[in-house]
Amino acid sequence: MIVAKDVGNDKLLGANSWSLLSADGWNKVTGTFIRKWMSLEDDVLLLTDISITGDFWQRDKEEVNDAKITLDFIVQLPQVIIKENALKELIIEIDKWFSEPREMGIELSNVCYQSFQITFGMKDEFICSQINLSVQFDILKNIE
């Protein structure tokens, strides 16, 4: 259990929610900021409700031509604690990734027996460009 002082909730990080889409658009991670506080170790922490969803071809169709893309899975994580500094680091690393795509990963939690890591890489079949991710992360740049 984390005991600490509340540091306010008015539009956490300048936004109430965020999203990150996969390059193919079939998978998405979204989050809603619920509460912000400071730990006894002076880390600013964010209680976040995270949803991970993915689409895929209808699995009951034998031919892809007969199938439509439909919701395939949902994972709901209603109490993920994220370190604000780690989130800022992720935004900086994503900006760097746009100019120099590479394998990278950031641990966002690592508190209260949790681990939540976001990783990026490259796939030969996708174009790595700022256009793919910038719209989703503009809202998070209000952190700075």
Image: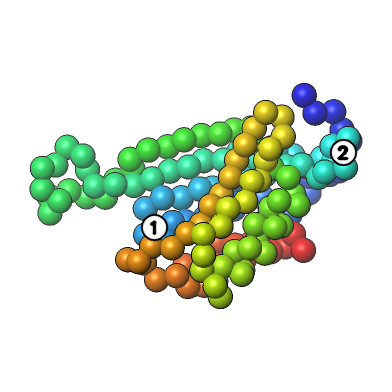
Say which of 13 and 125 sits in front.
125
Counting labels gives 2
- The crowding category of the residue bearing disc 1, from other C-alpha atoms within 10 Å (few below 14, some 14 to 19, many at least 20), is few
Amino acid bearing label 2: Glu
Say which of 58 and 103 sits in front.
103
Q: Residue furthest front?
A: 103
Mark 1–mark 2 Cα distance, whole angstroms, equals 38 Å
Amino acid bearing label 1: Gly
Which quadrant of the figure has residue 4? top right
Q: Is residue 118 above or below residue 122?
A: above
- Residue at 68% in and 37% down: 110
Name the residue that disc number 1 marks. Answer: 25
Q: Are discs 1 and 2 less than 8 Å apart at CB?
A: no
**SS of the residue at dot 1?**
loop
Residue 45 appearing in the image = yes
- Residue at 47% in and 67% down: 132
Name the residue that disc number 2 marks. Answer: 41
- Residue at 74% in and 59% down: 143
Answer left or right for 37 relative to 57: right
